[in-house]
Amino acid sequence: MAATSSPVRAIITGASGMVGEGVLIACLQNPAVEKILVLGRRSCGITHPKLSEILHPDFMNIHPLAERLKGYNACFFCLGVSSVGMKEDVYYRQTYTLTMHVAAVLAAQNPGMSFCYVSGTGTDSSEKGRSMWARIKGKTENDLHTLGFKAVFAFRPGIIEAAAAQKNLPLFYRRLRWLMKPIKSLFPAYVCNVSEIAAAMVAAVSQGYGRSILEIRDIKQLALASRHENPK
């Protein structure tokens, strides 16, 4: 995949959620990231010289924002919902329809953009399996490649560890956070942290990567390589 020689100028969605907030915090600390625009329904609650924010209530229609979304070479799409207790048509709309709409507008405004989509371990690229969420995520991954982006990367993290500074954590995670250390010790191959996801995203955009689907091992490998090239 082709890499960009320019500093990373990223649009981040989902910054008020656990993954998006962690990616945002890590990107603000990354010297390879020059500029960040957070696109969200509510404020991320962070101020920084290289951060700006657009609040928009309806992600099913971001056409009114099109002109303000120009000039970026990366999107880190961390917006997502759980499929637990959700009907398939609702999950499809909130996952596939919403993502494809936002992505299509971004691609039209930024032909040189690379799109990094947070998917999940077990996503079904065939779109034919029994798992509803996995089929829909698989279709989303597949169809993002049809929009004309410079590159599309699907990130499939497993168990995600939040950063220490994060505030926007789900209740279940806050209650069970103490379990993360033993889980990491017992099953290190199934765990990655948000800082690794962010570093891998920045590296994929700026350096390219040989696969469009990044499983946990790819995320860790790319993040490690990125840190060796950009030590703090």
Image (cartoon, helix red, strand yellow):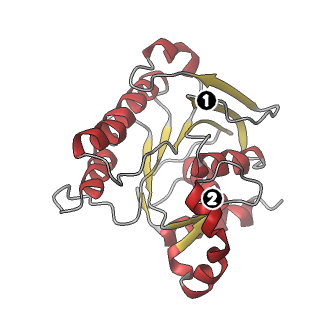
Residue at screen point 44% across, 26% down: 59
Q: On screen, 102 above or below 194?
A: above
The quarter of the picture where residue 194 lies is bottom right
Query: Is label 1 in a helix, a strand or a loop?
Result: loop
Residue at screen point 49% across, 69% down: 216
> Which residue is more in the foreground, 34 or 197?
197
Q: Which residue is mark 2?
A: 194
> Which residue is more in the foreground, 35 or 96?
96
Q: Amino acid at mark 2?
A: Val
Q: Where is residue 4? Give x, y as percent.
A: 58, 42
Residue at screen point 48% across, 67% down: 158
User: Seen in the image, is 68 located left or right of residue 26?
Assistant: left
User: Seen in the image, is 33 located left or right of residue 48?
Assistant: left
Query: Which quadrant holds the C terminus?
Result: bottom right
> Which residue is more in the foreground, 93 or 177?
177
Q: Which residue is mark 1?
A: 42
Q: Is residue 101 visible?
A: yes
The quarter of the picture where residue 44 lies is top right
Q: Where is residue 62? Give x, y as percent.
A: 45, 20
Q: Where is residue 86? Give x, y as percent.
A: 31, 47
> Which residue is more in the foreground, 169 or 100?
169
